[in-house]
Image (spheres, grey):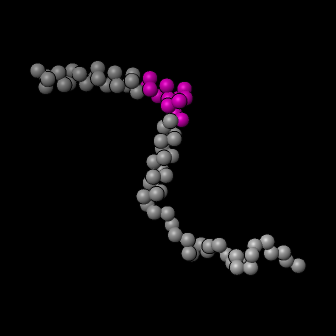
Amino acid sequence: MSVDILPPGLNGPVATVAASVPASLRSSLCAGWRRLLRWNARIEDSLIGDALGVLFLFSELVAFLWLAPLFGPFLQ
């Protein structure tokens, strides 16, 4: 004995896999961008973000000190 909860006209399937429309490329890119922004905010608010900031600042200083003698003749 089956019990129908829905009204008589709503017993059919909601959607089939073949009839579903895939998401557009733009919406998937926007979703990826939002995910990237969330990860960026999460990293910036953590100790890992602080460590990465110090690492990149130190590496920029080393790169500047290494490249300064090479660009010195061009700046004169």
Residue 26 falls in image quadrant: bottom left
Q: Please tell me which residue is depicted at 48% across the width and 37% down the height of the picture.
A: 40
User: Looking at the magenta stretch, what is its main secondary structure?
Assistant: helix
Locate residue 41 relative to residue 58 in the image: left or right. right
Q: Please tell me which residue is depicted at 84% across the width and 75% down the height of the picture.
A: 3
- Residue 44 in magenta? yes
Closest to the observer, 63 or 9 = 9
Place of residue 6 in the rendered image (x, y in percent of width and height, measured from the top left)? 75, 73
Closest to the observer, 15 or 44 = 15
The residue furthest left is 76
Quadrant location of the C terminus in the rendered image: top left
Place of residue 27 in the rendered image (x, y in percent of width and height, measured from the top left)? 46, 57
Query: Start and end of the magenta stretch?
Result: 42-55
The residue furthest right is 1
- Residue 61 in magenta? no
Place of residue 73 in the rendered image (x, y in percent of width and height, measured from the top left)? 13, 22
Place of residue 70 in the rendered image (x, y in percent of width and height, measured from the top left)? 20, 24
Locate residue 9 relative to residue 36 in the image: left or right. right
